[in-house]
Each structure stands twice: as structure tokens, then as C-alpha cells.
Amino acid sequence: MKKKILIIGPSGSGKTYISAELRKGGINAIDADLVLDLSSWFDNDGKEVEYPEDADKEFLNNHEFLWNKEFLKDYLRKQDEIYLFGLSGNVFNVTDLFDKVYFLKVERQVLTENLRHESRENPMGRTDYQLENALKYAEEIEQKARELGIEIIDATGKSPDEIFKEIKQ
């Protein structure tokens, strides 16, 4: 069976790290941020825009990071078993494309540390407002995931292999 698994979680929950570690082990674990043409930032009029590294309250309140559902549908059709790690403003509108969806939860302090870590390539969380916004959004999306019955994985302190074992059950 060709399994299509989506693993979502807030910025700083370890999606990029876990997917990279699983790929080293030969698992088709993909960081959605690395899928060319899957996602972009859009303004309120639906116009694609560049994300500024110092995105402020004005930008974050008036722009959204979205996945292209038709692109994703085509991308998934070309995959055998895949574990897609990512998050977008419309992620809950694409869950129907997957066989199973999981939510990675980590403690707030871990999110804060991860968002501010110097090795982090994703700029989200660098400014105080971005951090505050990311932490608030983390709570909102976890609540939405719970409402939708998405299985929650507490990833705090767990290795990628331990997390993958929970997903593979």
C-alpha cells in the first residue's frame, strides 16, 4: 500500500530536523518547505509576496503562508510511501489527501529555544513579535488538531527514531 502520511506541528517543533534524520535512514520523509512550488506567502488579495526576515506585526497580520492543494495532490500522486512534514495556513484543508495525519507537540520552552537557535535556517521566530506570534499560533493549531481528532505525538525529548516508531504503529 502506498501510504501518504502528513506530520504537522508549529514552527520549532522539529519537523525539519526529524525529516532530515529520517531521510538519512532511507525513509521518504520530506520537509514541505523544500518542495519547490508547493508553498508561498500571500497577501489578503491573494497576491504572492516575499517573506521579509524581519516580518513585523503588520506583515504577519496581513499575509498567510499557504500550500497549493492542486500541486500537492499531483506531487503525492507521484510518490510511493511518503511522510510529509510541514505546516501552512491552509494545512487543515489538505488533510483529506493523506491516509493519516499526526501533530508534533513540544513544550513551549522547547519551541522558544528552537525558534531562537542560531542553527535555525527558517527565519520565523527571530524577532520578539515573530516569537510571540509563533507561540500563540502553536496553541491555536494544536487546539484545531485536537478538535479534528488528529493524533498528537509528544515529541519533547524524543529522537526522530522514537517519533517514527509512533507514526509507523
Image: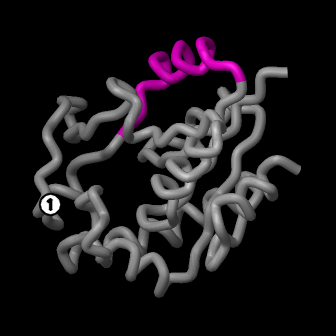
Q: Position of residue 84 (x, y in %)?
A: 58, 39
Q: Residue at x 23, y 47 (%)?
A: 63
Q: Kindly indicate the quadrant of the structure image that contains residue 92.
A: top right
Q: Is residue 165 above or below residue 138?
A: above
Q: Which residue has dot 1 on it?
A: 55
Q: Which residues are magenta?
A: 66-80
Q: Residue at x 33, y 24 (%)?
A: 37
Report if residue 67 lies within the magenta region.
yes
Q: Kindly indicate the quadrant of the structure image that contains residue 5.
A: top right
Indicate the secondary structure of the residue bearing disc 1: loop
Position of the N terminus by quadrant: top right
Q: Residue at x 47, y 42 (%)?
A: 31
Neighbours of disc 1 within 10 Å: few (<14), some (14-19), many (20+): some
Q: Is residue 33 above or below residue 97?
A: below
The main secondary structure of the magenta stretch is helix
- In this picture, residue 119 sits left or right of residue 53: right
Q: Position of residue 75 (x, y in %)?
A: 52, 18
Task: Determine the residue located farthest toward the front in the rendered image.
Answer: 25
Q: Is residue 106 above or below residue 16?
A: below
Q: Residue at x 59, y 20 (%)?
A: 76
Q: Position of residue 120 (x, y in %)?
A: 31, 64
- In this picture, residue 119 sits left or right of residue 73: left
Q: Position of residue 133 (x, y in %)?
A: 32, 71
Q: Kindly indicate the quadrant of the structure image that contains residue 49.
A: top left
- In this picture, residue 35 sits left or right of residue 145: left
Report if residue 85 lies within the magenta region.
no
Amino acid bearing label 1: Ala
Task: Determine the residue located farthest toward the right in the rendered image.
Answer: 169
Task: Determine the residue located farthest toward the bottom in the rendered image.
Answer: 109
Considering depth in this image, is 30 or 67 the residue closer to the camera? 30
Considering depth in this image, is 48 or 35 the residue closer to the camera? 35
